[in-house]
Structures are given as structure tokens and as C-alpha cells.
Amino acid sequence: MINITLPDNSVRKYEAGVTGLEIAAGISEGLARNVFSAKVDGEVWDATRPIGHDAHVQLLTWNDKEGKSTMWHSSAHLMAEAIEALYPGAKFGIGPDIENGFYYDVDTGDRVITDADLVRIEAKMKELAKQKQTYRRRDVSKQEALDYFKKKGDEYKLELINELEDGKITFYESGGFVDLCRGPHLPDTSPIKAIKLTSIAGAYWRGDEKRKQLTRIYGITFPKNKELEEYLHLLEEAKKRDHRRLGKELEIFTFSQKVGSGLPLWLPKGAELRERLESYLKKVQKEAGYQPVITPHIGNVELYKISGHYQKYGQESFRPITTPVEGEAFFLKPMNCPHHCEIYNHKPHSYKDLPIRYAEFGTVYRYEQSGELHGLTRVRGFTQDDAHIFCTPDQVKDEFKGVMAIVMKIFKALDFDNFVTQISLRDPDNKEKYIGTDENWEKAERAILEVAEETGLETVVVPGEAAFYGPKMDFMVKDALGRSWQLGTIQVDYNLPDRFELEYIGSDNEKHRPVMIHRAPFGSMERFVAVLIEHCAGKFPLWLAPVQAIILPISEKYHTYAEKVLSLLQSSEVRAEIDTRSEKTGKKIRDAELKRIPFMLIVGEREEADGTISVRRQGEGDLGTFSVDGFSELIREEIRKLLSDKN
Ligand SMILES: [Zn+2]
Ligand SMILES: [Zn+2]
């Protein structure tokens, strides 16, 4: 008999060789139907795999992340089986599950897979899934594995097998399809009810441009049709909100191949938007005791040797810039921290000077492969809303608190009310991986945990995820569609102060090392604006909207009055424009609605005579007649509410 410990810590006795599925059946029939796989001592196994020893077991269903992975990876096998049935002789690369669904890389020889094929494959998958095919695991020797795929003529699998250790190779069989795989898989295909193959892309075998290009087919499956429909709806919404599309429509940014890929060009409306975000943060930071600094875009290679960036990233970064002086070389700045350390070092410090908080909207450059670039979220040059705090170990907690207050303020001002905070700590079993003293680590980790507790934030604590130089806190924002984006980060660092020999004289008259805190509430301006566009679907909060109001004269006769309204609005700092086109008012309103301009101000005979404007709110309709001053006050009041600290 063996002891199985379940997640609620209850211990049950079973015959050795019991499976996750059998354990589930003992609990309830419903659970047994829904069990996809089982976590056995931290490793995900087939629910049908016998457990031979005492173990902690967690049964995984569709509601678990790993349960979804099991379903999607099993679906990749099902898709391969369908492809093999439809296109005999097809060869297969790899077929993993991914964040949303799965893919398989296939080589169908001269046959090109098209969208029409996807429909056929989907239909075949449904047919096969209904047969309730089981996924059977089998240990095979390396020779046996090689023989099988040699006979089948699949050079991709042969290459993979050649790299595996004999004795650790398993095959999985479902229907007539045999695959080299570690697993785990579903007990059978019956949970795969709703199937959608979403797209086709080219993918080099093993990511190597010199090797053959295979066809990567992406798909996703669900246990219920309704879930698939919801997912497709979300996908459609996401497409509408894609910041690359909206960024162009709203004239926020552009790219030019002549300038270079991954180098965003901010258009006037985007630059103004960014400036407003920056000046807002600058104001908040000034109130919180930050001091601005400015550093150049390049730095001597030696600087990055001291910081360690050269050793770590030198090979994958832009090549150094050389000068006519023999041996002199510079790097495009990949981060601002080393520069800020040298600013700290420009004079000696006493403990009374600390904390020192240097802030800079510092533009940095990092090489990314062209295939990795994506709109504003993955670029080669970007501006961090960076700051570095230098403080004593005893000040870490208060400083952390201060930074979090700034992050919360920003999230509120921008309407991100759904976010998760991840705290990354040291791996307690592997302390030698980290630098810095135990005492300081404990102090910093305790500080972060206490601050999180005191602020009542929902946090996920992940041991082992800390940077080697210190613990950190990351903010994952959920946008309006429920998608998670990693934005701000706060990191404690014991490493750079050591490397740059930063010091302060303590109250004991001895030299001490300050602790450094890196923080960027937005992350980068580029990424933040991208997330903001997708979150609000281009309908920016009023205080950020590039155009807050558009004046719509009902005919050319009222252009002079419109000009007058415009200049009044401008003098009360309302950002406004006039639509002078000779279009019908209805058409002008529709266009303004589409451009998501918050207010439309209609002016005609009556308004001119009364010195008023008729106000429409985007997405809402008529608000009635206002004096220009009254309207300006309405805008100011709304912005005040958004940016106030009160909820
Ligand atoms: Zn598999
Ligand atoms: Zn930094």
C-alpha cells in the first residue's frame, strides 16, 4: 500500500500502481470525467500513469493551467493524426502547447497548406476526437525509436531522438498515430469538443534560418463550444484594439524601414500624449522627493564591464561604436543604472543625504531579432521611466512603500483597476546563487512582504524568481479584455552598489554600502502607451486625449464663431480642433465618434446668438447647452476627479 497526500493534506491509502484517474473515481464520478492529468510530487503525469510510491498528488482539470496545457498538447497530437490521415507522408517537427492553444510544425512536402486545408483538418480532428481514442504511453529503447522513424522516413524525429538518452525515451500512441513524446496527455480524446485551427505561419526547423522552413499550424481547443465562441469573440475584440492598428488610425506613432525596424517614430499627437504622461509622472515624482538627472545615450565599454552587462549581454547587443582613438569603444546605452551609479559617485555621501532618488526618462537601446519585434511592445529603442533610489538597508521598506504609492496612483489615474502583484524572492534552498548578505536579503524580503501586507494588495509570492542581485516586485495589469501585461517593476539591488563601490559614511563614521532600488512604474513609455491603447481601445482618459473636444460648425457661416470658441477653449487649456469640412453635421459627428474624441461641440445660429455651444459626449450623446467657460469647468472637474488621490 502507498500513501497519497492530496492538496487539502488528507492522506489516503491505495494499492501501489494506483492512477490519478482511479483516485479521482474514488472521490466522485464527475471528477473522474474531468481529470486531464495529475501532478505527482510536482511533476505533471498522465492521469492513467501508475503511481508506485508515496506521493503528493493534485488532480488537474480544465480549471488548472497545467490541465489546459495537457488538453492543448494532446490536441496537437490529434491534429498531427488528422494531418497524417489527410496528407500521407507528412513529417512532423515539434508540437507543444502554448499560452493559448498549441501548434505543430509539419512538413507536407510539395503540398502547401492553405486556409481551406485548416477547415478539412479541423473536421477530421472532430471525427477522430469523437472516437474517444486513448493516449497510450510506452517506454521504448533508443534503437527501437530510431528504427520506427527510420522506417517512417521522418528525419526530424530522428534528429530529436539522436539527442536523447537511451532509457528515457517514450512513445505515445493515439488512434494510429505514434509520436515521440514525454507527455503528459489526456486519458482519451473525449474532452476535445470544440476545435479551431487559427493560423498558419512559416517556421524554420529548430529556429535556424539555414534549415528547412516547416509549416506551423496553430490551433486551440475547448471542452465546450461556448468557451470557444467566447474565445473567438475576445480574439476579434483584441484585433479591433490592436495598438498597431489604432496607433496608426489615431496618428500616435509610425515606423519607417528607412529609419530601421524596431525604432518607433512618435507623431505629433503621440508625442504630446507621451509628454502628458511624462509631465504627470514628473510632477508625482517631484512631490515624492525625486531629483531629475540626464545622461547620454552611449557609455564607454569599460562602464558596462564594471556593471557586468558587457559579460552578460555583450554578445547579443548592438556592436560597439568605435572612435578614431585606438581601443576606444562605446555601447549604445542598454540601461541607465550604471550612469546613475556614477552620478551617485560624483561626491562623497553621508547617511544624512540618503535616500537619494535620481529619476530620468532615459532612452535605451537593445538589440532584438527582427522576428521578435512587435509594434511598440517589442522595440529596439525605448524610453524607460527610470529612477534609482540609493538608501540605507533600514530605509528599504519606506522607499518601497513610496514607490508602490506612485504605482497605485498611476494605475488609478489610468483606470487600470485590475492587476496582480508578483513578489519574487530568493530560492531558500539555493542561497549561493545570489549575492549580498543573508541579513540584507532577509531585511529586504521582509520589507517587501510587509509593505504588500500593509497595502492590502493581492500578491503572488514566488520563491526562486528573484534576480541574482535582489528581490523584486512586478505588476501585471489586466486590461479590459482580461489579458495580462507586465508593466512596472521595483527591484532591490545589492550588486551594482558593490561593483561601483558606492559608499556613504554612517552615523558610526564608518563606510557603508547603500542599497539600490531600480523602479519603473510604466516600464517603458512605448510599452505603456501600447498597453494603454489596447486597454482603452484608443479612448484615452480625458486628461490624456490628444484632442479633448472638436468644434462642429453646422455650416461655413459659423466658422468665425467656431474660431472664437476655439480660442476661448485654448486659453482655458482645453485641447480642441475645428472640423471645417463642408460635410453634413451628422457625418462630422460620426467621424468624431470613430476617432473617439471625448466631446463634440456643435455651433450654429442659436449658439452664435447666445454665445453658447451644444455639447455631445462621445458614446453617450447630448449633454445640452453650455457656455464655453461652463464647458471648460466641466472638463477640469472631470480631470481633477481622475487624478485625485481619493477613490
Ligand atoms: Zn505529446
Ligand atoms: Zn536600473
Image (tube, rainbow, N blue to C red):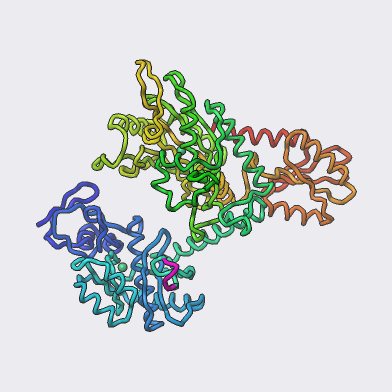
For the residue pair 604 and 111, the one nearer the viewer reads as 111
Quick one: which residue is furthest to the front in this view? Answer: 326
Which residue shows up at 72% across the image and 33% down it?
Answer: 633
* Apparent side of residue 582 relative to residue 631 in the rendered image (left or right): right
Which residue shows up at 45% across the image and 25% down it?
Answer: 355
Q: Quadrant of the N terminus?
A: bottom left
Q: Is residue 528 magenta?
A: no
Q: Compared to 289, does 140 lie above or below? A: below
The picture places residue 274, in percent across and down from the top left corner, at: 62, 42
The picture places residue 375, in percent across and down from the top left corner, at: 56, 55
Which residue shows up at 65% across the image and 47% down it?
Answer: 270
The picture places residue 241, in percent across and down from the top left corner, at: 58, 55
* Apparent side of residue 75 relative to residue 16 in the rendered image (left or right): right
For the residue pair 143 and 111, the one nearer the viewer reads as 143
Q: Quadrant of residue 624?
A: top right
For the residue pair 404 and 621, the one nearer the viewer reads as 404
Residue 284 at least partly seen:
yes
Q: Main secondary structure of the magenta part?
A: loop
Q: How many labels sit on residues?
A: 0
For the residue pair 217 and 59, the one nearer the viewer reads as 217
Q: Quadrant of the C terminus?
A: top right
* Apparent side of residue 633 relative to residue 180 in the rendered image (left or right): right
Q: Quadrant of residue 151?
A: bottom left
Which residue shows up at 73% across the image and 55% down it?
Answer: 591
The picture places residue 182, in percent across and down from the top left corner, at: 27, 65
Q: Compared to 143, does 423 lie above or below? A: above
Residue 645 at least partly seen:
no
Q: Quadrant of residue 545?
A: top right
Where does the magenta region start and end?
A: 208-212
